[in-house]
Image: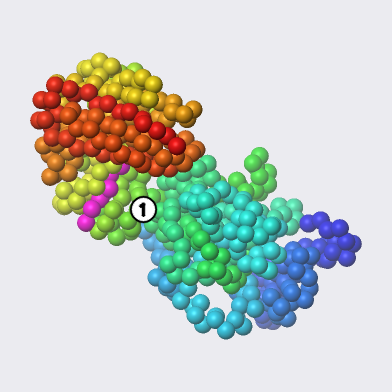
Amino acid sequence: LKHERPEQRTATRLVFLGTFAPLASSALQTPLAHAMADITQHVRELLCTLVADRLGPERVAELLGDRIAIRVFTAYLLKDADNIPPKGTYEPRVYSNRGGVNYYRPDGWVQVWIKAIDQDPDFVELQDWPIAYHGTDSSKLGSILEAGLRKPGELPRVQMAHGSAGAGPEGAIYTSPSLWLASHPVYSTLLKLDDERWVQFAFKVRVRPNSYKVQRSTLSSSKHWDARIQMDPNMPHNESLEWLIPSSADVLVVGLMLRELGPSVDASVFGTLASRVSAHQVEGPEYSWTALLKGALQSGAYSIDNGDLRLGFNSVEWQLCNMRTKGDEYEPRQRIMSSSFDLGNPGITDCRISWGKTSAACYSICVSFTVMSEQPLWVVLSCGEYCRHILIAASSGYQAWAYSPKKEDVLDKLADSICVHLRFHRANISAQVLCLSVSDNKCFWNIDPAMLDHTYLSEFSRIRSEVASLTISGVELNVYMLMCPRGLISAYREWCEVRVIFCAGPLLATLTYELSLGHKRVKRTLVLQSAKQTTFTVWEKRSEFLNSGNTKISLEIVSLI
């Protein structure tokens, strides 16, 4: 730490003379009492040094009190790095349940209470607010203690630090019910105290019930963490670890958590794993700690079941077991995702299969992949009694398909599992069959009647055209069409369903179009959302479409404002 004024430099120098080593002393008559006194003094001096320049000594005294109140949570899961309790025997230590959310005992942390909060007349009401955490950099301690957690841009000094995944244009405050996630070095950076010794900080907060949006950990599929390992051993998966709070009025800071890392720290408090962190690695202590943590959890089999993936020549099978347990562990909109895989022969890359719940009675099966094949492809997707055939244009790029079958239709009740089959094979048709012809502000798709009666086509089948580009009033608009020869809704099985999908760029526009399907003509106006796909659907009786003598689908853009 560097300060401009000499008196602050002196104070800084004095703070770092102390360590948590006295905790291990047995020469004292009452070692625990003396140890708590030493650790209390150490924490107070450290915090005063970090925030006094911004808040001033009087405000620091008001927040922390004359006698700082701390609580030490000694390490238990990470106490012995060479003997991590296996997942099958580990029981999470739940201290309480607040607002329907479990509060788990911290593992190897020191907690500092903020005195002013206890004196708040509304503090009793806060007892029912769930507990969460917000990892932070030491340079932000003063501003957060003074003004609380704020959204980026809400105050001049509050800037975006880690992106805004899922927050929307208005922004949000990110917290987590998991101290394990909030303390990841991406969020809770390491402050160097001495050679081979660092400290981390995370704020403990209370969040108003039902004021936040829950989403999966955005670290779980990045370079910072392995998606196959639990981020928090207290939680079975990483799907609900991030809370996005739209309003700063719905979150209140109630405490500060700190943890030391490095060879000189007291392993009886922070655990032997924390004492193995070193700066000798090329990437620094942050990566040293993350690698140690991942290795420890892996050795204890704290893994997430992402299903059993079996790859064939041009097909894949993905099986998920213990579905009754997963049905209890996962909430709607939370998902289990397979690892990514490629199928080189049909030209399929970056393919994933995932499972989730849309409700207690319905599952959601999703498949995404990128088509690099130079020929049209049939994609066959099946699960239980369900089977869908999809005809896709050559080199059509990223594709995503989903369906929501009833639970009993896909669940093997004897095996308590589901199995998804995905197969790709080249379609024996000309690539021109799926091409859209473009002329000025019009595009056409000539449907081959024989293709609609193809043996592969079932009531769930779809045929997807290639993407065409239209330039209207100087604006480029991408369009593709999707045909369901037998409507996806049971009442429309004798009808053809045609969907036209507009892919707009960074604009908000009003589009007027005219669509011709057999004898049917439709003229509509719709609003194109910025950087989003906009879809409209038209139905026509299958027999009338095929007998009309005109199986060309015609789209004309009348205006774009």
Residue 472: horizontal and vertical position, in percent?
A: 43, 28
Q: Seen in the image, is 376 located left or right of residue 102?
A: left
Q: Residues within 10 Å of mark 1 (few under 14, many from 20)?
A: some
Q: Is residue 237 above or below residue 537?
A: below
Q: Is residue 355 above or below residue 66?
A: above
Q: Seen in the image, is 41 located left or right of residue 554?
A: right
Q: Which residue is mark 1?
A: 334
Residue 17: horizontal and vertical position, in percent?
A: 79, 64
Residue 425: horizontal and vertical position, in percent?
A: 25, 23
Location of the N terminus (image quadrant): bottom right
Give me the residue at 22% from left, 23% from top: 552
Q: Seen in the image, is 202 located left or right of residue 354?
A: right
The residue at the far right in this view is 6
Asked whether the viewer can see residue 153, the reply is yes
Give me the residue at 65% from left, 65% from top: 144
Q: Foreground: 554 or 447?
A: 554
Q: Which residues are magenta?
A: 361-370
The secondary structure that most of the magenta stretch takes on is strand
Location of the C terminus (image quadrant): top left
Residue 103: horizontal and vertical position, in percent?
A: 46, 69
Instruction: Please tell me whether residue 342 belongs to the stretch shown in magenta.
Output: no
Give me the residue at 51% from left, 82% from top: 124
Q: Quadrant of residue 539?
A: top left
